[in-house]
Image (cartoon, rainbow, N blue to C red):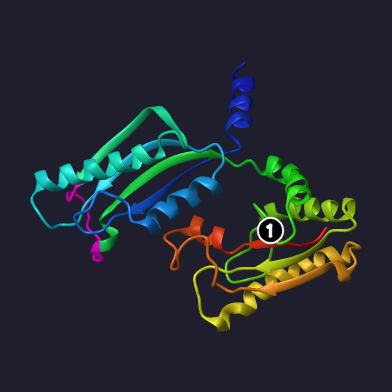
Amino acid sequence: MRLILLLFCLITFKGFSQQKQSFYFNYNESEFTEIERQKIDDWIKIHPNLTVLKVEGFCDWVGNNQYNNELSDKRINAVLSYLTGKVKIDQAIKTKSFGKEFKQNEVQDLNRRVDVYFTYLKDQDNSEKNLDKELYSAKVGEKINLKNLNFNGGTAVFKSHSYPVLKELLETMRSNPNLKIEIQGHICCYTESNDHDVSGKRALAVYNYLIKSGIDKKRLKYKSFGGSKPIYAIPEQNEEEREANRRVEILILEK
């Protein structure tokens, strides 16, 4: 019986991942900037079935303890207020205001923040099944992000979880013979033009995969954007943001 229960738990929680995401505030402010608001919106889009578990607020060292505790409370409330109705908030959610009583970063901008601890379902199977529908319903000129198609940092080497996505893209191209696409490569971490080669190699890797699998190269183009069109601002704050930025998108050319 215990073995059955253990297996059930492993199966139930296999698709979930607990993460931390930080959002930042200007000096002495408890309202978001437009940049941070967009960052939150992008974060929500990237993580399906998002559930917030814990929220912690922080301030820089300026001011007394009472003031900073109140300010970090306001920052927590601002985040929760914005997230309410957009994501699931756990009924047993925990919040804590640290004020300035924590190990401060030397860069004060990084201390004026709220940390959100959350879990989400890595819904890879659904995203793959939906790719055909997305490409079918997309109009000429629209782009589709190939979710879960990721690369090892600084390379054009696919991560192991990317191959089901590649297969789904291949099947979509096969089932839609009039579909022509441009494969667009992006990188993380840098914006300089001399790093475009990595994004070009990533787009080329997808291009070559499709050609080797029998797709006519006349239906395919590829293009490098380097770090000029990041989802998250560069430099990124964590590996999750870096992985999101090093991506491949599909531009619909003809249908």
Determine the residue located farthest toward the top in the rendered image. 1
Residue under the image location 44 percent in, 54 percent down: 38
The foreground one among 220 and 212 is 220
Q: Nearer the viewer, residue 162 or 114?
A: 114
Q: Residues within 10 Å of mark 1 (few under 14, many from 20)?
A: few
Q: Residue at x 51, y 80 (%)?
A: 192
Secondary structure, mark 1, is loop
> Picture coordinates of residue 214 (x, y %)?
91, 63
The percent coordinates of residue 155 (x first, y second) are 63, 71
Q: Quadrant of the C terminus?
A: bottom right
Image coordinates for residue 126, horizontal then vertical, percent: 69, 40
> Of residues 160 and 145, which is closer to you in this image?
145
> Which quarter of the picture shows residue 36?
bottom left
Q: State yes or no: residue 105 in magenta.
A: yes
In-image side of 74 versus 126 (left or right): left
Measuring 66% from the left and 63% from the top, which residue is drawn there? 248
Relative placement, left or right, of 57 versus 84 is left
In this rendering, position of residue 120 left or right of residue 92: right
**Span shown in magenta:** 99-108
Magenta-colored segment: predominant secondary structure? loop
